[in-house]
Amino acid sequence: MALENKITVGVDVAKDTLAASIFNGQIHEYILLDYTQKAINKEFIKRFKNLETSVVFVMEATGIYHSKLAYWLYSAGFDIAIINPLIIKRYAQMKMSRVKTDKSDCAIIAEYGYKEELQLFKPKSKETVTLGNLLKASEDFLHQKSIALSQRHALMHQADYSKEILSFYNKHIKFITQEILRLKKKIELLLEQHFTNEYELLSSIKGIGIMSSAMIISVFDSFRNFDNAKQASSFVGIAPAPYESGTSVKKRGSISKQGNTLARKLLYMASLSGVQSNSLLKQQYERLLQNGKSKKQALIAVAHKLLRIAFGVLKHNEPFSINYIEERKMLKIC
């Protein structure tokens, strides 16, 4: 429901600029400003700080670029809503909008924020942000190691390669491996010191390890801002996306790839472990294979199940038990 005396500021965030639409329910005012604290202070904070009118800033979750703006505005006392880009895309499609410019994008964001019920942004704790950064660094180093291994492999398959050059690769790979181990130890220490309860609960689920626990705690903020597991799976892009039209067009469902890539990867890796160590997940996996699903489809379904179990465990503050008769009760909110 639209509120009287309400303004939404839809912000389209880019690396160096902010396109904003100030919307009061009838009229859009468009402004373009530099992405600097000075410009934000002048155009946003000073302008709206003392208004009696309710003001909400609405923006899309654009990787890393929106984060500073959200924290600056939140610190200044404003209400913030950060929306999944897929939701804004669907909202624009519903309005049959064909224009795609910064001006039209921020106007769509502003209208969505004005007309729809919003979940307001709450910043993560310093420890949660640090955990997420350590996790990202670890994955970056793993990617670098994979590249270096491929490059070394290519070198060694040359007819007459230099052993001196090979030694450079070996030293580089050894260094990256050591840094990955150091990062993993830091992640585990942070989990044990600052997220003791969450880590113990997640560790009760066979298939969930150090890295997947760190991901759930940092990316989802331990599900604090999610009402059900369906929201969480949509947020990360692991919810099944069936494609049907009438009775003649039926394609195989796939996961939506909108969302956090790292979270999807770690959930998928956890599913590989889960089908080996967790009898509940193994049964689901084998049943899906028997029903004609591919291994990848079955593992994606297992990853989705793992996410639902993790959600139930953290929301109920109870460790997972495979023999827990009331498991379905744990997952009702999912």
Image (tube, rainbow, N blue to C red):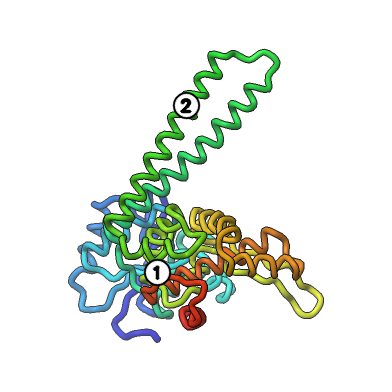
Q: Which mark is residue 265?
A: none
Q: Which mark is residue 223?
A: 1
* Relative height, residue 121 to residue 36 (above, below): below
Which image quadrant: the N terminus?
A: bottom left
Q: Residues within 10 Å of mark 1 (few under 14, many from 20)?
A: many
Q: CA distance from mark 2 to mark 1?
A: 38 Å
The secondary element bearing badge 2 is classed as helix
Where residue 217 appears, as percent x and y from the top left, is 38, 61
* Residue 103, x across and y down, in percent: 45, 62
Given the image, on which type of amino acid does mark 1 rest?
A: Phe
Residue for badge 2: 172
Say which amino acid is labelled 2. His
Relative to 49, does residue 161 appear above or below in the rendering? above
Q: Earlier in the sequence, mark 2 or mark 1?
A: 2
- Residue 3, how many percent across, how many down? 34, 85
Residue shown at 30%/63% (left/top)? 123
